[in-house]
Amino acid sequence: MSYEAIQVTREGKVAVITLNRPPMNPLNSAVFRDLAKAADEFSTDARVKAVIITGAGGKAFAAGADVSEMATLTPVEVYSFCQGSKIAFSKLENLNKPVIAAVSGVAFGGGCELALACDFRIAADNAKFAFPETGLGIIPGGGGTQRLPRLVGATKAKELIFLGDIIDAVTAERIGLVNKVVPADALMEEAMRMANKLAEKPLVAIQMAKAAINLGGNVDLTSGLEAEIQNFVIAFASADGKEGLSAFVEKRKPNYTDK
């Protein structure tokens, strides 16, 4: 499959998406279309068991939305632009495979919002995060006002979004915005290590756990607990569920088939 604004490579069971608009990898409509297309492709590709998203050039994961495109849009057109980001980010957020953001350099505005849509965020020690939109007279429009509070809490999210301050990787890790900080030259190695570790897990169990967690963050506790049970039953009834439990009882290594 061909892409206009991203590059897709595969290393074993891991697919790597590279935002390919260096040096700053701004997000435009073409990027959103490509990300949505890639998510659809990976969702049905049995060879892919984990996905990494990163940015080309090392200076930026993504420096935000492409202001040169946005500035000329009418309100109706900018609504469509935001819908493009919502569709792409939601497809990645709900992809039936784990997704890792490998962040080097700046992740501002839409770039940070893209990272928020991933399951995990690994940051290089040169990474910087910010939501500068209020300084431009606008607000985040790619999920920042919704995903950030769910991750770091409403008060900290308001601080970051209202003030627009830039935070470094260590601060991002401290507040729970990223999972881990590593040296810049080890970023992709660490992301690949995690992706390969995830790829060795039985896929149905990962899918059901992800579905339960994602749904649970948006419903009341009672509904979330019921969804957890339903997803548990699906995993339990899977071939890998049977294999995993049998292997435990028989004290042997399980042989998972992702079924």
Image (cartoon, rainbow, N blue to C red):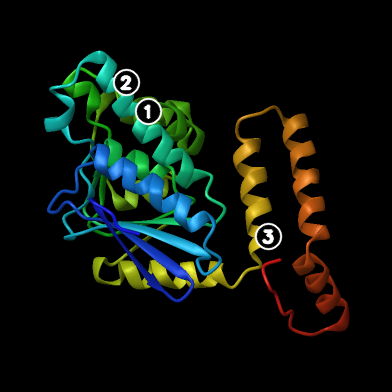
Q: Amino acid at mark 1?
A: Gln
Residue 123 higher or lower than 77, as above or below: below
Residue 67 higher or lower than 8, as above or below: above
- Label 3 Cα neighbours within 10 Å, binned few <14 / some 14-19 / many ≥20: many
Q: Amino acid at mark 3?
A: Val
Q: Looking at the image, which residue sits at the far right?
A: 249
Disc 2 and disc 1 in contact, CB within 8 angstroms: yes
Comes first in the chain, label 2 or label 3: 2
Q: Looking at the image, which residue sits at the far top?
A: 75
Q: Amino acid at mark 2?
A: Tyr
Mark 3 lies on residue:
204
Q: Nearer the viewer, residue 163 or 28?
A: 28
- Label 2 Cα neighbours within 10 Å, binned few <14 / some 14-19 / many ≥20: few
Please state if 237 lies on the left or on the right of 17 as rendered.
Answer: right
Comes first in the chain, label 3 or label 1: 1
Q: Nearer the viewer, residue 236 or 252?
A: 236
Mark 2 lies on residue:
79
Q: Secondary structure at mark 3?
A: helix
Residue 50 lies, in percent from the top left, at: 49, 63
